[in-house]
Amino acid sequence: MTSRSKKEWREKSLGPALQRLPERRDDFATESGLDLDAVYTPEDLEEVGFDYERDLGNPGEYPYTRGVQANMYRGRLWTMRQYSGYATAKESNQRYHYLLGQGQTGLSVAFDLPTQIGYDSDHPLAQGEVGKVGVPISHLGDMEDLLEGIPLDRVSTSMTINATASVLLCLYMAVARKRGIPQTEISGTLQNDILKEYIARGTYIYPPRPSMRLVVDVFKYCSANVPKWNTISVSGYHMREAGATAVQELAFTFANAIEYVQAAVDAGLDVDDVAGRVSFFFVAHNNLFEEAAKFRAARRIWARIMKERFGAREPRSMMLRFHTQTAGVTLTAQQLDNNVVRTTVQALSAVLGGTQSLHVNSRDEALALPSEESVQLSLRTQQILAHESGIADVVDPLGGSYFVESLTHRLEKAALEYIERIDGLGGAVAALERGYQMREIHESAFRHQMETEEGRRTVVGVNRYVTEEQPVKGLLRVDQEAAQQQVARLERVRQERDTQAAKADLDRLEDVARSHDSTVEAILECVESYCTLGEICDVFRGVFGEQREMAGV
Amino acid sequence: MVEQQSKIRVLVAKPGLDGHDRGAKVIARALRDAGMEVIYTGIRQTPQMIVEAAAQEDVDVIGLSILSGAHLEIFPEIVTGLKENGMDDVLLLAGGIIPLEDHEPLKKMGLSAIFGPGTSTKDIVKFIQDAVKERSST
């Protein structure tokens, strides 16, 4: 009995099967709510007019759906980059050396919240927060400690920093300069994605428009001086963590990216000078196929935006390069070992999706920063996927799957519709000023919570298969002694520096901030005369003002 | 005769500097859906701002959400501030990333309950309704 169409198959085969045994659910859907058929066939691809050359292309070729490199991981594996930083610069430096010693291939610096929001470690609002979620960096001395013994001309460094991105970049460049390493030799990535801070992550300082200028200042400076630096990592990760679906993650990320590229072009930069340094940051969530399809769709969307919307000419401008992190929100505080399994499946989707770099979350992170032991396990997860599973040996192994291609197409279509809506609101900045993205994300987050509570969504160990929980031993704890050392050092630095030189540099920075000139050079002078992060940001606060929260509930 | 009950008033607050407001916003909405009057402070609230908002809004309950790990430094200041303002009777709850071993010290300090990741909003609603009822009857 062979059916010749899906329709015929439904009647002949599926129908009778369903009569014998009904399906587990009334309807099946992805995380983003895309409904799922029982099976996908060539008909599904025909229906959407699937065209191999136009929609996929071969690896390393436009629109890069199959990957940005011709041979992908057969040449070089993805960069294994575990995000870390805590307590003090010295202690974080030890963790970096440990990770590099364990086979990690790039650094990823986590800064504490005061550093992210532009407060020195002794600011009243920094109380209790110093060194908690990342490393505190208030001045050049801290940055020197952080990078002690790290070969800056060989290791690439990713810095998760946004509102204060240009200050941290200057601190990094100042350390390189002190060591005699030319700016042309350092490489890394600055997150520098302020828009998603207003939408989801919360570490903004100034209003959106002056903040956009600071972002573009970094574009300009690096375009002229630091060729190996990715000047932005446009991040869907945090919006997804805040509740967005995969479709919203794609749409809001690219809507933001469009704003950045447009701002750079408006500032007089050539689109091909900017776009090649734009990188991305996505989450790898639970739904394996939707996530893998999401990464593939992302590459196609970006290539087309760059070519068709911005008229980019260089292939590199159209290549979407991205970092991936497994989904923090899926980690449960219950039955911690389950998290190892979750992150493995999520990491698998990232590799199947062709990521350039990966962070695997640790089992204990629903409770605290990860312990050294659990970070090692995360790195080992990556190494097992890379070296034992065989998934890195063939490019885009899911390509051509009726299901995955269909899903890739539908995700792209849904995301483009959303982007059109945001365009209609005047673009990402205008939309977020009205709280649009925030509301959309909150709606998704609330729906997700209700589905879990009503049992329509299973979370193993939380709403099903529950066991008695025991207190967890061996969690990492950052003590207050580290913060006290940090504050004492800061006081010493302020006393020992040339006060007049520092003051003069801050005054000059204020003049530049009030003009339309690039701020980066002036910040670099400030950090080299040991002005602190807080002092520099206070100058900007004075000129630009501070942003209050835009959307409530 | 049905007794006219006033709505339970809740301040949902985010002390500390972290911007992870997904949980706080979801809880705020769930409590509102359960018929409570909810005021959400937004992120980056100092202990002083939270105490002032609680006093001004005359709330029965304060729910604190924090994920930065600064709870042991920040919560005591909120507890002290409430005492100084004669608001010891306000039900104080917390949620976020708070390790189990910190629960006892925080409860000794005056927090009535700590709801960790994975808690159902229905459990929180019930806890608040029961606790407020108990407090108003004593």
Image: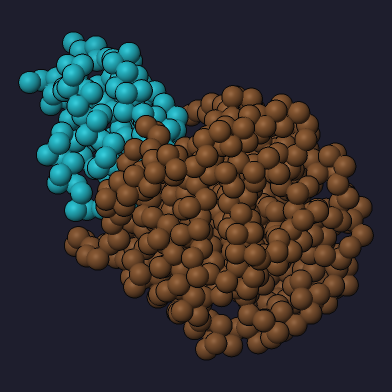
Chain colours: A brown, B cyan
What residue do we see at 12% from left, 39% from top? B108
Residue A514 relative to residue B11: left or right = right
**Quadrant location of residue A529?**
top right
Q: Quadrant of residue A42?
A: bottom right
Percent of width and height locating residue A109: 51, 59
In the image, taking residue B64 as reference, residue A42 lies left or right, namely right
Residue A511 in view of the camera: yes
Front residue (pair A19, A268): A268
- Tell me where residue A61 sits by quadrant: bottom right
Q: Nearer the viewer, residue A153 or B107?
A: A153
Q: Residue at left 83%, top 77%?
A: A58
Q: Work out which quarter of the rendered image holds the N terminus of chain A and state it.
A: bottom right
Residue A459 image point, x, y percent: 39, 59
Q: Position of residue A24 (x, y in %)?
A: 47, 65
**Looking at the image, residue A493 lies above or below residue A172:** above
Instruction: Please tell me whether residue A416 is drawn above or below residue A38 in the rendered image.
Output: above
Q: Position of residue A59 (x, y in %)?
A: 79, 76
Q: Is residue A44 visible?
A: no
Name the residue at 55% across, 87% down: A387
Residue drawn at the location 28% of the way across and 57% of the way down: A477
